[in-house]
């Protein structure tokens, strides 16, 4: 079995979240402008001290809008904040900060839905990136941190395991279309011992190591900092395929059900009846009608008559015809004799 190619390893790239986050930080920071002296136009409820308190709508000087709940002039409770660049947040607030459950729609089309703490993604949340990739798992201070699942839309592969400060790290499983890798990850790359599990029923165990060539290059270039060398997979053991064969359990005769016994008896009777019918056909008289040529012959009659039947009938007809001929000859002779006598009588009268 050849070793897995680099395409089948853990190097499915994920989009950089830092750019999106930096943009969102600038976008979200604009919410703080509402706490400035000039709060813009406001239409809503107030308390006895004249503060924004209760339900209201605000049009901020920078073009952003807020529609939601206030408490002592601070956004507090449920509300919707719309940014002038097209982004918006729908969720809970606590003292002007996103806190609790909320959904943030970013200008590039990405979206985060989950828990917020002190204006940070914190706790469990689901992020859908602009390229279609998704992450569902734990967050800590705006970073993917803890356990989570990242799905790559283009390949269908997914990473299920640990995260540290936004990077794939710790025990994890990288699942591809027809195989998966189980092992440890560091900075988004597999390291150390692990194994590939293939859907055809075998496993390849081994480890990711640094090649001797890469080590020599590092020793020669110690003075200059370099990027970490790519690790290579070294297989150490391959399990054999286990072919599956179906097993058929035979039922002992003593355990046969009554229904099966009745069926067997009925089959025996049917065989006996069939045998009797065959014997009857063998002893059939010669002048009987036969069906031997009827099967599958559409261009011939369904039944044929034995030649012996035709011969006996023909002989009887010939005998009838012979007897009739003798009677006719006899009658002709009698008529001829009568005619001769009449002629003789006439001749005798004339002589007289």
Image (tube, rainbow, N blue to C red):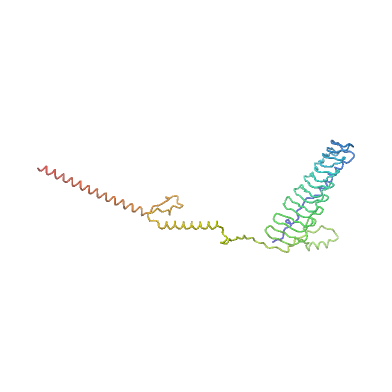
Choose top left, top right, bottom left or bottom right for residue 182: bottom right
- Quarter of the picture containing the C terminus is top left
Q: Position of residue 142 (x, y in %)?
A: 82, 49
Q: Is residue 100 above or below residue 205?
A: above
Q: Residue furthest front?
A: 258
- Quarter of the picture containing the N terminus is bottom right
Q: Position of residue 321 (x, y in %)?
A: 28, 50
Q: Residue furthest left?
A: 352
Q: Position of residue 199 (x, y in %)?
A: 68, 57
Q: Which is more toward the observer, 325 or 257? A: 257
Q: Is residue 316 above or below residue 95?
A: below
Q: Using residue 134 as the reference point, say whether residue 70 is left or right of it.
A: right
Q: Which is more toward the observer, 219 or 74? A: 74
Choose top left, top right, bottom left or bottom right for residue 346: top left
Q: Using residue 1 as the reference point, say whether residue 277 is left or right of it.
A: left
Q: Is residue 189 above or below residue 43?
A: below
Q: Which is more toward the observer, 96 or 272? A: 272
Q: Using residue 337 as the reference point, say whether residue 318 is left or right of it.
A: right
Q: Position of residue 244 (x, y in %)?
A: 64, 60
The number of numbered discs placed on residues in the rendered structure image is 0
């Amino acid at each position: 079995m050849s070793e897995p190619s680099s395409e089948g390893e853990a190097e499915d790239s994920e989009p950089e979240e830092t750019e999106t986050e930096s943009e969102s930080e600038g976008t979200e920071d604009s919410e703080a402008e509402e706490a400035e002296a000039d709060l813009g136009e406001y239409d809503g409820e107030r308390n006895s001290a004249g503060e924004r308190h209760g339900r209201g709508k605000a049009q901020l000087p920078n073009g952003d809008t807020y529609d939601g709940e206030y408490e002592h002039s601070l956004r507090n409770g449920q509300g919707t904040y719309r940014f002038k660049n097209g982004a918006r947040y729908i969720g809970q607030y606590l003292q002007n900060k996103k806190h609790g459950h909320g959904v943030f729609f970013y200008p590039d089309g990405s979206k985060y839905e989950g828990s917020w703490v002190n204006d940070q993604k914190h706790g469990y949340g689901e992020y859908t990136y602009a390229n279609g990739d998704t992450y569902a798992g734990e967050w800590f201070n705006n970073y993917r941190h803890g356990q989570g699942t990242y799905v790559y839309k283009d390949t269908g592969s997914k990473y299920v395991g640990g995260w540290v400060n936004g990077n794939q790290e710790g025990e994890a499983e990288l699942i591809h279309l027809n195989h998966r890798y189980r092992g440890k990850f560091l900075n988004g790359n597999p390291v150390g011992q692990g194994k590939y599990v293939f859907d055809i029923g075998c496993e390849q165990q081994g480890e990711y190591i640094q090649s001797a060539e890469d080590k020599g290059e590092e020793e020669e270039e110690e003075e200059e900092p370099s990027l970490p060398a790519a690790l290579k997979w070294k297989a150490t053991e391959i399990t054999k395929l286990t072919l599956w064969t179906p097993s058929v359990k035979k039922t002992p005769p003593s355990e046969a059900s009554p229904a099966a016994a009745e069926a067997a008896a009925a089959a025996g009777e049917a065989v006996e009846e069939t045998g009797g019918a065959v014997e009857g056909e063998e002893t059939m008289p010669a002048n009987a009608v036969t069906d031997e040529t009827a099967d599958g012959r559409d261009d011939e009659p369904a039944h044929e008559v034995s030649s012996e039947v035709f011969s006996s009938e023909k002989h009887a007809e010939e005998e009838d015809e012979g007897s009739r001929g003798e009677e006719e000859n006899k009658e002709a002779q009698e008529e001829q004799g009568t005619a001769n006598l009449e002629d003789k009588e006439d001749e005798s009268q004339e002589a007289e």
